[in-house]
Image (cartoon, rainbow, N blue to C red):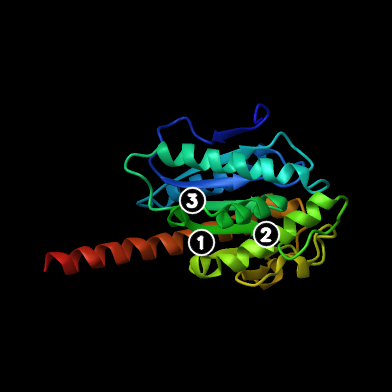
Amino acid sequence: MFWSYHFFLRSSRKVSGIPVIFVPGSSGSVEQIRSIGSILHNKTENRNSPFSFDVFGIDFNQELSGISGMYLERQIRFLRLAVDKIWNMYSPQPVGLIFVGHSMGGIIIRSLFYSHDFDLSRISLAITLATPHSAPPFVFDYYMERFYEKMRLEWKERAEQIKNITVISISGGLKDILVPEHLTQDSGIHHFSTTSIDTVEVEVDHLCIVWCNQLQRYFFILLNSILNLFIYLFILMNNNVNK
């Protein structure tokens, strides 16, 4: 079933950092992880950060998931298997996984969270780029319509369980003519437009949002701040225990 799907690690070393999983969108390439991966790698090295990132990319063989909903369920199942595999690569296991999804890749990530047999404690953060959360920009078949209906029902059913999961949706602004900004917003999701981010000076189109250097640098600032907070709280708790 998954003979054409793969996942890759953007490194040759043994995994020991914080896992970041990139999920491409419709017809998207796994090579899109290069921009995110290079920024995270260079910034952590230059700043001598106490942590590093292991960036994984999911390869759906550039399937047109934005045109037909038939691909989506299969992609969710593969992502679930990939997450299990990645999780088991670590010893000790990581505190959590960071997901980054572009376009329909964000929908794949979000749908995975709603699966009743998925362990939500594995999730640290999810960032989606130009993802149509509230509705598909185009509906070409019944499968796509049914998929979104099912996703909305599952969101309501698991609302209490997933309320503490942080999902950030970033839209490109007026230059994204494929996914209008209002579709990137939904309940339970923190939405930002590139025009509202201080370090990003321009709007971006649907593809540029993946490799926009200013936006990638913002990702590092965001993740660095969150992780430094975790480290501070960890040290604080240890000090209190040792008193």
Q: Is residue 26 left or right of residue 59?
A: right
Looking at the image, which is closer to me, 121 or 230?
Answer: 121
| Mark 1 crowd level (few <14, some 14–19, many ≥20, 10 Å Cα) | some
Identify the residue position indicated by label 1 in the image: 221
Up/down of 130 relative to 53, above or below = below
- Label number found at residue 43: 3
- Label number found at residue 56: none
Helix, strand or loop at mark 3: helix
- Label number found at residue 151: 2
Residue 123 x/y as whole percent: 48, 55
| Mark 2 crowd level (few <14, some 14–19, many ≥20, 10 Å Cα) | some
Identify the residue at image location x=86%, y=56%. Answer: 138
Q: Quadrant of the C terminus?
A: bottom left
Residue 33 x/y as whole percent: 61, 43
Q: Give whichever of discs 1 and 2 has the lower sequence position.
A: 2
Helix, strand or loop at mark 1: helix
The alpha-carbon separation of the residues under discs 1 and 2 comes to 31 Å
Up/down of 122 relative to 228, above or below = above
